[in-house]
Structures are given as C-alpha cells and as structure tokens.
Image (cartoon, rainbow, N blue to C red):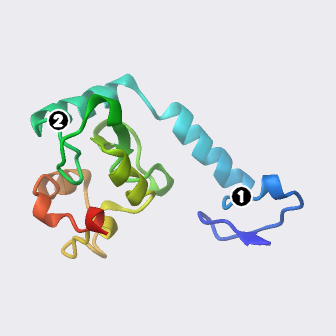
Amino acid sequence: MTVCQRCGIEIFTTHKKLETTLCRPCAKKRQYSLTYLRSTHSSAIARQRWLEIGKLCWWCRQPLDDRDIHRDHVIPITKGGGGGENIVFSCATCNKKKTDKMPQEWLGISDFLGEPVGIGDLFEVLPDPTHHAGAEE
C-alpha cells in the first residue's frame, strides 16, 4: 500500500510494474497537464528570457549549451503551474534537483515562505544568483 503524493489517498497496487506515487485520477491530471499545457508560445517566452540573461541556466546562472537545455516550470505543474510565463530554460542538473519543488522552497527565499507569491514577484527576485541556495546542494 502506498499514498498518493498529490492528494494523500491510499493506493492499493497488485502488480510491481504498476506501483506509482500518484492515484489514477491524479496521474490522469498530471498526464493532461504534461500533454496539453505545453505550447510553442511558452517556449518562445522562455527562449527570450534565456537570451536576455546571456544564455545561462535560469537557476544557477552557468552557461547553458543548446544541447543541455531543459524546459522547466517555475511553478511545478503538479502544484498549479501552467505554461506561458511559467516556463524557463535550465540545465539538466538544476531541473533534476528542483524536481517538483516550489521555487521559494528550492532556492531558500525566506521572504516568500508562507506568503502567496505571484509569478512576477519571483521573476523580479530570481535573476539575482545570490538568492540561489538549491543548486549548491
């Protein structure tokens, strides 16, 4: 028996290959988000930001090679983030370390913890790499 990471209900599994951390309804919502919320418009916005910061990873500010680009959701899809302005380009290392954490949690921005944060507020704070604690782990 396992508990769904998204909604907390108990999941009963009978086959090892079918074990999951999401219940069926949450898994369907996640798949829908991954499939239908991606757009070329959001990639264009992310690319523009990437060019503005000098082709660096959004999170760690290290040079980002065209072959190492990962599309990353600032607010994870699993926590309500969509496309558009929520997409940035990051390196594989940062994208994998961030997983589905909220940026405030991952970056250690204590000013925002526990408060509602608009995406614009995060984009004002995040360009300063001194706020980045998460990639150093």
Q: Nearer the viewer, residue 87 or 97?
A: 97
The number of numbered badges drawn on the structure is 2
Q: Amino acid at mark 2?
A: Lys
What kind of element bears circle 2?
Answer: loop
Checking the image for residue 55, the label placed there is 2
Picture quadrant of residue 46: top left
Residue at far right of view: 14
Q: Position of residue 23 (x, y in %)?
A: 71, 58
Picture quadrant of residue 109: bottom left
Q: Residue at x 32, y 29 (%)?
A: 43
Q: Position of residue 122 (x, y in %)?
A: 21, 56
In the figure, 68 relative to 103: above or below? above
Checking the image for residue 20, the label placed there is 1
Q: Nearer the viewer, residue 99 or 43?
A: 99
Q: Amino acid at mark 1?
A: Thr
Q: Position of residue 107 (x, y in %)?
A: 26, 66
Q: Position of residue 71 (x, y in %)?
A: 37, 38
Quadrant location, the C terminus = bottom left
Quadrant location, the N terminus = bottom right
In the image: residue 22, left or right of residue 121: right
In the image: residue 129, left or right of residue 106: left
The Cα atoms of the two marked residues, 2 and 1, are separated by 36 Å
